[in-house]
Amino acid sequence: MSTIKISKLSFAYEGSSKEIFQQFDLNIDSSWKLGLVGRNGRGKTTFLNLLLGKLTGTGKIFSTLKFNYFPQNISDPENLTIYELQELATVEQWELERELTLLHLDTALLWQPFSSLSGGEKTKMLLALAFADKDGFPLLDEPTNHLDEASREHVANYLQHHHSGYILVSHDRAFLNQTTDHTLAIENQEIHLYQGNFEQYEEVKRLRDEYNQAKNERLKGEISRLTQVRGNYKDWSHTIENQKKSGQKTAHVINRRTQLNKGAIGHKAEKMMRKAMNVERRIEKNIAEKQGLMTNIEESPMLTMNFVPDHHHTLLPCKNFKLQYDDDKTALFENQTFLINNHEITAIIGSNGVGKTSLLKNIFSNSENLTRTGELNLVEDLKISYLPQEFSKYCGKLEEFAEQHQLSYEMLLNNLKKMGFPREDFALRIEEMSMGQQKRVAIAKSLTEEANLYLWDEPANYLDVFNQDQLIKLLKEIKPAMILIEHDKYFVDQVADQIIALKKIEKI
């Protein structure tokens, strides 16, 4: 058992005045299955890179561990998988085969080119590599991306029963609940360590936020009262100053039996003005102290969606529908019958490769090399907003992007701000942004587009749980017409009015 000891660690990227981490201390036990959570852009990947030595801050990180990062980059995807994995780490074939068996993956895949593997198979191969090296401590960065529900269960069960500890970054709360026993949360510039999984962390955070919210409301009331008193004293000092300048009589310095004494008026007015100013300064100090006691609470403001309901109740009737590639006699799926209705959210689920994305693309443009039979009759002239699974084609500055896609630039930026997108990154080109930032741009684009029907392919992917909760809240309130593909069970359970399961047709 080893310890990762962090002492007085601070870090800011070059050219930025904002510190991501500031003088924090932390001890991590290597036996922990530690979930690393926090909003996109708050420093999760930065923290992993500091542990790996790819970035250097001030302070100290003490550890005798050798860190293994997931996912590693394959240099030659056309090479046999086993050779590529052994290029990345010193592992024996039997060690890889042991881990692959635990992951329910055919060991014969080691002898296929890496490029020939499916997305889920590639993920499992790289995960097996991270754990096959017994001298290493795994740092797992989003191991569930693009995995179907069955594969997520395989990976979760694998991690749950593995003897070694790790640090895991994931935005899938169900996956975190299954695979972690400690939680490290990055909230603003603060680090909070909790014993327990994500669900237990959320409950503690909820109670803490409720307490801080009540405290903030009390302090706001006290600040408001003091601000009013300060205003009264400011008005009083101005009145005295004006009286001094004009030489007016005041009740404080003259009565009916005395004659006007301008010297007395000036002296008394000066004294009273100093008193008013001293009281005002004390009040300002008191206000500043109370403002300093207020707690900065993570907030998830309501997003906006440009949904325009169509007058039809049913937007897409589907009957005995079958889809297959033109050059393949075997169907992806067949005999699908369902209705897509207005103000209803339909989730399409199924294993990787069953044809979910192909179905969505076929509804959107019918441009894939696919043969379709049966009925799939979309109401004419519907405005459709399509959120693709792959959004790497988006490029350019945000203002140019908005103009190109005929979007309201103001609404686009407003939704990005609400999703926690850093203002200083608005000037970046989209292709220079992180995957989390690019995904938020893609989501904001779809929300900004005027649409009667939304087609969303894996909206929760690359989004932190705070952004996911924002989308869940929005979809529950707006109830747009939507077809979505999503492997995150929690997300689907929260928003879906109906679930359609596609089943793969096995080749004979």
Image (tube, grey):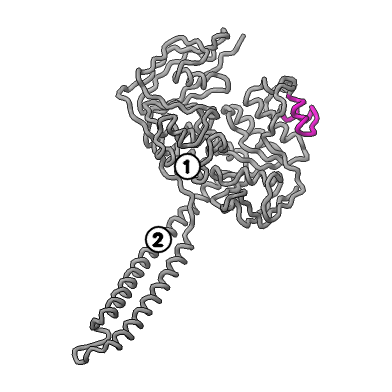
Q: Nearer the viewer, residue 506 or 78?
A: 78
From the viewer's perspective, is 233 left or right of 415? left
Task: Give the crowd class for mark 2: few <14, some 14-19, many >=20 residues within 10 Å.
Answer: some
Q: Nearer the viewer, residue 124 or 233?
A: 233
Residue 174 in sight from this viewpoint? no
- Residue 411 % position (x, y): 40, 38
Task: Give the crowd class for mark 1: few <14, some 14-19, many >=20 residues within 10 Å.
Answer: many
From the viewer's perspective, is 466 left or right of 185? left
In this rendering, the answer to whether 63 lies above or below 324 is below
Tag 1 residue = 419
Q: Earlier in the sequence, mark 2 or mark 1?
A: 2
The image's mark for residue 220 is: 2
Q: Amino acid at mark 2?
A: Lys
Residue at image point 44% right, 40% down: 413
Q: Amino acid at mark 1?
A: Met
Q: Main secondary structure of the magenta part?
A: helix
The answer for how far apart the CA atoms under marks 2 and 1 are is 25 Å
In this rendering, the answer to whether 446 lies above or below 364 is below
From the viewer's perspective, is 337 left or right of 189? left
Residues in magenta, as a range: 81-99
- Residue 77 % position (x, y): 70, 24
Whether residue 97 appears in magenta in the rendering, the answer is: yes
Depth check, mark 2 against mark 1: the one in front is 1
Residue at image point 56% right, 52% down: 18
Q: Return the residue found at the far top.
A: 329
- Residue 465 % position (x, y): 52, 40
